[in-house]
Amino acid sequence: MMEDGTLGRVLAVVGTRPEAIKMAPVLDALEDRRSRVETRLALTGQHDELVDEALATFRLEPDWDLGIMREGQSLTEVGKECLGAVSQILEEWRPDIVLVQGDTASVFFGTLAAYLHRIPAGHIEAGLRTGDLQSPFPEEGFRRLAGVLVDLHFAPTPHARENLLREGVADERIHVTGNTVVDALQAVADQARDPESPILRRLVGPDGPPFILLTAHRRESFGRPLERVFNAVLELLRQEEKVEIAYPVHPNPEVMEPARRILGDHPRIHLLSPLAYPDFVTALAAATCVLTDSGGVQEEAPTFGTPVLVLREMSERPEGIKAGVARLVGTDPDRIVEGARALIGRAPEKQRTRSPNPYGDGRAGQRIAALVEAFLRAGSQATKV
């Protein structure tokens, strides 16, 4: 036990908007335990405005804003900056456990910093695997490397747990908790509001047209794959004259340039600025279907019964595919058009039959916070012996 009477210190490290969204329920649950657990948040800052918006949505303020990103920075430079900045916090504050979430640079290098300082780490959303180190790149490598170093694996599903067991992780270190994104999504959906964008307000309104939500931004999609997706969208709208597209465009130039060049002049394609998370949730709930290369969207959409076409050849989230709420179509235009048209024809009035989200029940944050507290309590008792 610490001198102030708490069980110990927890440092949460996040770098991107999805990480902030998925870490929020854990931080909220730890805040309920503030008399026993002291928690602080470090923001590495791979996303700037995007992550700031997410933090504001969940009323979170980082204790450290490291701002590691520079224009044109390589992955090597991101890793170097992240490792150094997190290490400095560990040296100054000396937490008893470091929490990371997902599969970005902040996850692996935050975990590596903890390991080098002999501080335990817990990995939220542990055990996701495609089995291909190049897809998604570099996320598959980051999460597998982090998995070697962490002490607590918070697996979102039984399938993720099985992946970890096959890699030799001890069963007692794995805890199936559900995915915290379901917690976050439910919290935001319960506070519905009108979207800020006039275009989006029209699309999601009671008299709005059928529309498809598009999200495409992953690194392995850059170049020809992304262009194939965009051309498939054009062909889809040629065949479906009443359908519109809402596309919140990621600010990365590798995404913005082809999006504007290929899609920018079509009257039924709406290239939007990145949406605030509550607006994104509203769009996701109202969309006829989703075209996405995102992992998080695959987890979020089932809550609303919104079908997903995954713009990748493989997914580390097979639960949605097995449940029939998601389908892999890759970047092949024919598969994209065929898949989207089938969904449009099946839900002309946006009516869906919802089943439980296979990724969680909305209580993952509380489970993880309880496990972290138990870990600190065990460490405190061991210190007394």
Image: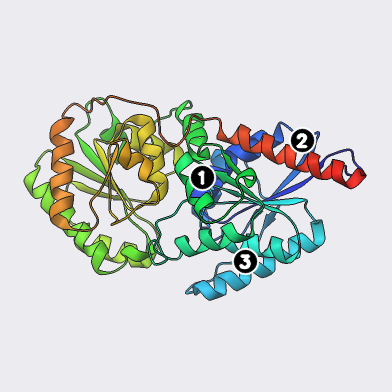
Is there a contact, CB below 8 Å, between mark 2 and mark 3? no
* Percent x, y of residue 284: 34, 37
Residue 55 appears in which quarter of the rendering? Answer: top right
- Assign a secondary structure to mark 3: helix
* Percent x, y of residue 48: 53, 57
* Percent x, y of residue 338: 13, 46
Q: Is residue 143 above or below residue 76?
A: above
- Residue that label 3 marks: 82
Q: Which mark is residue 34?
A: 2
Left or right relative to 38: residue 58: left
Q: Is residue 10 above or below residue 36?
A: below
Q: Nearer the viewer, mark 2 or mark 1?
A: 1
Nearest to N terminus: mark 2 or mark 3: 2
Disc 2 and disc 1: Cα gap in Å? 29 Å
Left or right relative to 205: residue 123: right
Nearest to N terminus: mark 2 or mark 1: 2
* Percent x, y of residue 99: 65, 50
Q: Which mark is residue 161?
A: 1
The N terminus - image quarter: top right
The three-letter amino acid code for the residue at tag 2 is Arg
Left or right relative to 1: residue 123: left
Residue 65 appears in which quarter of the rendering? Answer: bottom right
